[in-house]
Amino acid sequence: MKFTQLNHRSWMVDGWTQDRRIEDFKTELKNKDEEYIKMLKQQRVDITTLISKMREQYHSLRQHYEQQLEEIEQAFEEERKEMLQKNKARFSIPVNSHC
């Protein structure tokens, strides 16, 4: 074999190896892209779930606080009513006692 034939064969092998590497890189890139897309979709699901749970907690806490506020207001109204009755009885002066 001549030197040029060896170079030609070497070039063909190198060319095939290079093409193979390019195809491997393209395949790897495609796999990474698909993995990235899959990860983004999972993040979307996770975020949606998180927001939903946060919304549920917010509504639950709000309802709980509304109940507590109603109980506080009711207790305040009862104490106010009792104080008014005590003060009314305490400050009502019989008309006959001063005459």
Image (cartoon, helix red, strand yellow):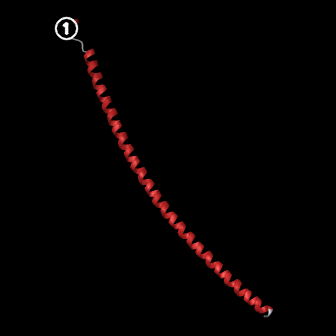
Classify residue 72 by image quadrant.
top left
Percent across and percent down for residue 2 are 79, 93
Percent across and percent down for residue 21 are 65, 78
What residue type is disc 1 on?
Asn
Looking at the image, which is closer to me, 9 or 73? 9
Q: Is residue 47 left or right of residue 12?
A: left
Q: Is residue 65 left or right of residue 97?
A: right
Percent across and percent down for residue 4 are 78, 92
Residue at horizontal 45%, vertical 54%? 50
Q: Is residue 35 above or below residue 93?
A: below
Q: Is residue 19 above or below residue 69?
A: below
| Quadrant that contains the C terminus | top left
Label 1 SS: helix
Q: Is residue 24 left or right of residue 86?
A: right
Looking at the image, which is closer to me, 86 or 14? 14
Residue at horizontal 26%, vertical 21%? 85
Percent across and percent down for residue 43 are 49, 60
Residue at horizontal 52%, vertical 63%? 39
Residue at horizontal 28%, vertical 23%? 82
Q: Is residue 35 left or right of residue 83?
A: right
Classify residue 18 by image quadrant.
bottom right
Residue highlighted by disc 1: 96
Looking at the image, which is closer to me, 4 or 59? 4
Q: Residues within 10 Å of mark 1 (few under 14, many from 20)?
A: few
Q: Is residue 71 above or below residue 91?
A: below
| Quadrant that contains the N terminus | bottom right
Residue farthest toward the right in the current orientation of the protein: 3
